[in-house]
Amino acid sequence: MDQIRDIVQLVGEVLGPEALGTCLHGSAVLGGLRPASDLDLLVVARRTLTDSERRALLAGLLRISDPTAGGRPVELTVVTRSAVRPWRYPPTADFQYGEWLRADYEAGLVPRPEPAPDLAVLLTTARADGRALAGRPPGDLLDPVPRADLARATAAGVPGLLDDLDADTRNVLLTLARVWCTLATGDIRAKDTAADWALERLPAEHRPVLAHARRLYLDCRYSEESWSPGLTAQVRPHAQRVLAEIGRLRQGRTGGATSG
């Protein structure tokens, strides 16, 4: 895709040989891009970015990632090799661009290094399935994330998910299903296959909401999304049920939902 080519070129122009490897990960390699999928890229750098490099990378991404121009939103993360190898928790993201912060970037925000627990999930998927676009492959640059740290990272964002349940319903529900699946199995699956896993384990009354979120993910852009009043009324009870399952796993219990 033109956007991927442009991002790789941008990283090369800004960082040159200091970029040890650039890879594509996420939906594009896990299960295929869906109508509303981001382009997820990871860059492993030799050192932390300078201020001028941060501004140059940000300016280029604001241009390349602009959805109003007909492209896909981009999520690009830069980590320094020394910050993630040898592994320690929580990892630090040296630079992270996400389209959801466009207004802040345009107001002057420049991404800075910060601890990012959920980076453990990103690094695990990139190491396992990332497709090298330039430089060395992620398996050569990243250490494995211990399963205990992967579980910690997977659950780290759960408390804040309910805050976005009304505004970003499909993604919150699919993320909760994936958290549940990952804690139970140790696998990080694409959103639709994690939803399949959860649907097999949910009671019948809690399946329609997640099944609808899965269909939206597979078939619809956000502008095409709709929820009936009946489904909307079921969203929060469904989320509470999945949160209860996540809570049981985090507490070390083995009980799970039935499939009846």
Image: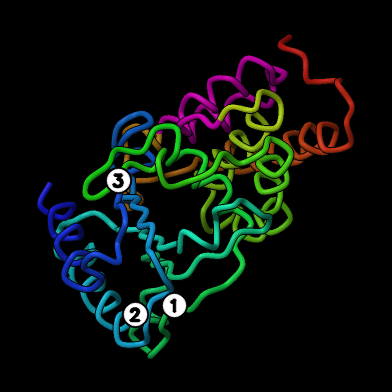
Marks 1 and 3, how far apart in space? 24 Å
**What kind of residue is marked 1?**
Pro
The residue closer to the viewer here, 174 or 16, is: 16
Q: Quadrant of residue 51?
A: bottom left
Q: Which residue is mark 1?
A: 111
Kind of element beneath mark 1? loop
| Tag shown at residue 54 | 2
Q: Quick one: label 3, few (<14), some, or many (20+) residues within 10 Å?
A: some
Kind of element beneath mark 3? loop
Q: Quadrant of residue 8?
A: bottom left
Q: Quadrant of residue 206?
A: top right
Kind of element beneath mark 2? helix
Query: Left of 250 or right of it: where is 217?
Result: left
Residue 19 shown in magenta: no
Q: Is residue 219 placed above or below 47 in the rendered structure?
A: above
Q: Is residue 48 placed above or below 168 in the rendered structure?
A: below
Residue 192 shown in magenta: yes
Nearest-to-viewer mark from 2 and 1 = 2
Query: Left of 30 or right of it: where is 120?
Result: right
Marks 2 and 3, how far apart in space? 22 Å
**What kind of residue is marked 3?**
Arg
Q: Which residue is mark 3?
A: 136
**What kind of residue is marked 2?**
Arg
Residues at discs 2 and 1 in contact (Cβ within 8 Å): yes
